[in-house]
Amino acid sequence: KIWYQRVWPFLQHEMLKPDVSAAVLHPVIFLIQESSLEDYETLMLPAMSKIFNGPKHVPVQVILLENLHVILEKTPRDDIRKEVLPLLYTAFDFSDIEVQVSTKF
C-alpha cells in the first residue's frame, strides 16, 4: 500500500514532465508488473493513458515497446484497443531506427 500512497503519486507527477518521463518509466513498469489487476486498472491505467496518448519521444517509445508484454498482460482488452494499439501503430510509422528496432518483438 505504501507504493500507492507515497511512491505512485510522485512517479505519476514526474511522468508528465517530458524531460524526465523516460527515466521514470522503468520504476513505473516495475510497479505495473507488481500490482494487482484491480490496482492497475483503477490507479495506474488512467495515468498511463496520458503517456500512451501523449507526445511520442523516442526514449519513451522505446521503453514502452520493450515492456509491451507487461502492459498487455495487465491492460483490459477494450483499453488495449483504445490506448495501446494506437501507440504500436505510431511506432511502426516512426522514422527513428531505435523505435523501429523495438517494434520487432
Image: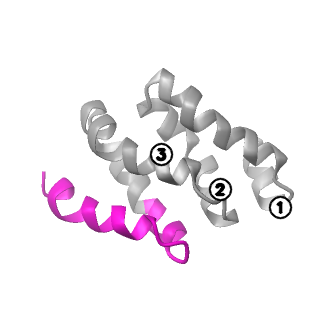
Q: Which residues are magenta?
A: 1-26
1 or 3: tag closer to the N-terminus: 3
**Nearest-to-viewer mark from 1 and 3:** 3
The image quadrant that residue 37 belongs to is: top left
Which of the two residues, 53 or 9, is positioned nearer the viewer here? 53
At mark 1, the secondary structure is loop
Spot occupied by residue 27 in the image (x, y as percentages of width and height)? 39, 61
Instruction: Evaluate if marks 2 and 1 touch, with contact meaning CB atoms under 8 Å apart.
Output: yes
Can you see residue 105?
no
Badge 2 or badge 1: first in the primary sequence: 2
- Main secondary-structure element of the magenta-colored stretch: helix
Disc 1 marks a residue whose amino acid type is Asp
Q: Can residue 45 be spotted in the picture? A: yes
Q: Is residue 92 magenta?
A: no
Q: Amino acid at mark 3?
A: Ser
Residue that label 3 marks: 49
Q: Position of residue 59 (x, y in %)?
A: 64, 65
Residue 33 vs residue 85: left or right?
Answer: left
Give the alpha-carbon distance from disc 1 to disc 3, as whole Å.
23 Å
Q: Callout 2: few (<14), some (14-19), or many (20+) C-alpha neighbours within 10 Å?
A: many
Q: In the shown orientation, is residue 93 left or right of residue 51?
A: right
Tell me residue 62's x, y (percent).
66, 57
Residue 54 coordinates in the image, percent (x, y): 58, 55
Q: Amino acid at mark 2?
A: Gln
Could you tell me which quadrant the C terminus lies in? top right
Callout 3 crowding tier (Cα within 10 Å): few <14, some 14–19, many ≥20 = some
Q: Which residue in the protein does label 2 denote?
A: 61
Label 2 – label 1 distance at C-alpha: 10 Å
Q: Which mark is residue 96?
A: 1
